Amino acid sequence: MKVVAENKKARHNYFIEDTFEAGIVLEGSEVKSARNGHMSLNESFATVKDGEVFLKNAYIKKYDSTSTFAPDERRNRKLLLNRREIEKISKMLEAKGYTLVPIKAYFKGSHIKLELGLGKGKKLYDKRNDQKEKTVKREILKSLKF
């Protein structure tokens, strides 16, 4: 499993309660560009519209060798999920405070997959508590090594 892009801020900004694996509908040149690692999930999110899930604001750089057709780098891309998963996601998104955030993109065999996280936004004090816990764990491990 080759990880192409990772949204490092997703777990920092959200309490991820559930994860889903989705396929992405891409053009040929986008797949080649993603395979080269020219993909970013920062500031991207997913929405449900008319029973379909779309990835918005994800960046896939234009492939260098593309001659005639080059899709928009930040276009909306359709995500492939089961109907039951889409219904579950849409019910959770209707609840207050839930967001569908892409966590990472990776190749599974020859197909590119996207891990989506369904979570609630963290408050500033939650982020501070996480940072404190991380620092304490790091210091404990450091003291055990000596």
Image (cartoon, rainbow, N blue to C red):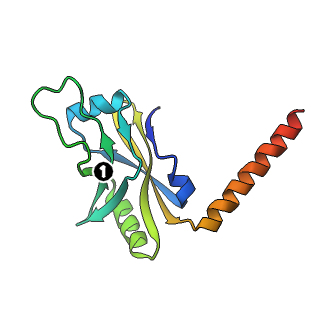
Asked where in the image residue 96 lies, by quadrant, the reply is bottom left
For the point 62% across and 60% down, the residue is 127
In the image: residue 39, left or right of residue 123: left
In the image: residue 61, left or right of residue 6: left
Residue 122 vertical placement versus 59 (above, below):
below
For the point 34% across and 62% down, the residue is 86
Q: Residue furthest top?
A: 65
For the point 50% across and 63% down, the residue is 119
Q: Residues within 10 Å of mark 1 (few under 14, many from 20)?
A: some
Decide which of 24, 71 is in the foreground and name it: 71
Whether residue 110 appears in this view of the structure is: no
Asked where in the image residue 132 lies, by quadrant, the reply is bottom right
Secondary structure under badge 1? strand
Which residue is the site of mark 1?
Answer: 80
For the point 47% across and 72% down, the residue is 97
Q: Amino acid at mark 1?
A: Leu
| Image quarter hosting the C terminus | top right
Indicate the position of residue 74 as horizontal and vertical percent values: 26, 47
In the image: residue 90, left or right of residue 134: left
Q: Residue furthest left?
A: 68
Residue 70 vertical placement versus 58 (above, below):
above
State how many labels appear: 1
In the image: residue 80, left or right of residue 41: left
Whether residue 125 appears in this view of the structure is: yes
Decide which of 119, 112 is in the foreground and name it: 119
Indicate the position of residue 116 as horizontal and vertical percent values: 43, 53
